[in-house]
Amino acid sequence: MNKIKVLIADDHELIRQGIRSILRSDRNAQVVGEAVSGLDAVQQSERLHPDVVIMDLAMPELDGIEATRRIRGANPNTHVIVLTMHDSEVMVRKVLNAGASGYVLKSELANKLKTALQVVRRGKRYLSHQLSEVLMNRYLLQAPLSQESPLRLTHREQQVSELLSLGKSSKEIGEILKITVRTVDTHRANIMRKLNVHSVTELLHKHSQISSLKV
């Protein structure tokens, strides 16, 4: 298996050293470059074509969100993992809407970075465990959409939809909601049909619309 080519983008030398140290113990990863600003990250990404960019959210010249948007726009095959100290739901949505595949808290960097790298390399989304739990609990406690909503998702469909957007598999969703995998797959098919989407990425954009319908 080819090594995962990684570009590290952070304006703090100590953080870059820490990331290099973590990845040095991962025989499946290879650091191909380092960037010290958002603009530098965009330019190096265009030149080096990394598989994954590990991006600090707070970057000079160009913030991590805009840098992510430009990197993904130029090369959709390059995945971005954002590093931050902020466990804000609003920030998570901004980052994911910009095209990032991973969101890792710096407090979990040492334990979760290698896992996040493998997950996003497979084309899946990774959220820090702490954030995943917070968002999951929030969504499960939400009231269903009004029947006046043009999207007309049932409460259960909304729960499944939100968990899909967090990168949960059908098996994981079944365990969380105490339903069978077959039932999850049925809900998933209904959700995709009702929302007229064909991927989890499209589903995420629909969630922004759903959120705007809620008081």
Image (cartoon, helix red, strand yellow):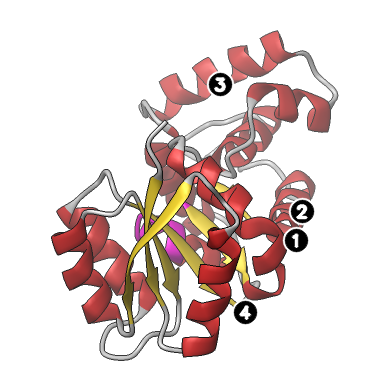
Q: For the residue labelled by badge 2, is the local secondary structure a helix, a strand or a loop?
A: helix
Of labels 1 and 3, the one closer to you: 1
Labelled pair 1, 2 in contact (Cβ < 8 Å) = yes
In percent of width and height, residue 205 lies at 39, 47
Q: CA distance from mark 3 to mark 4?
A: 33 Å
- For label 1, the residue is 130
| Amino acid type assigned to the residue bearing label 4 in the image | Met
- Which residue position holds label 3? 188
Label 4: which residue? 85
Q: Secondary structure at mark 1?
A: helix
Where residue 166 appears, as percent x and y from the top left, is: 59, 44
Residue 45 is left or right of residue 188, and the answer is: left
86 over 151 or under it: above or below: below
Query: What are the residue bounds of the magenta stretch?
Result: 95-101
Q: Can you name the residue that lies furthest to the right here? A: 178
Q: Tell me what residue is drawn at x 71 percent, y 74 percent.
A: 107
Q: Mark 2 = which residue? A: 133
Q: Nearer the viewer, mark 2 or mark 3?
A: 2
User: What is the distance, in whole Å, between disc 2 and disc 3 at their CAs?
Assistant: 21 Å
Sequence-first disc among 1 and 4: 4
Q: What's the residue at 56%, 21% (across, down)?
A: 188
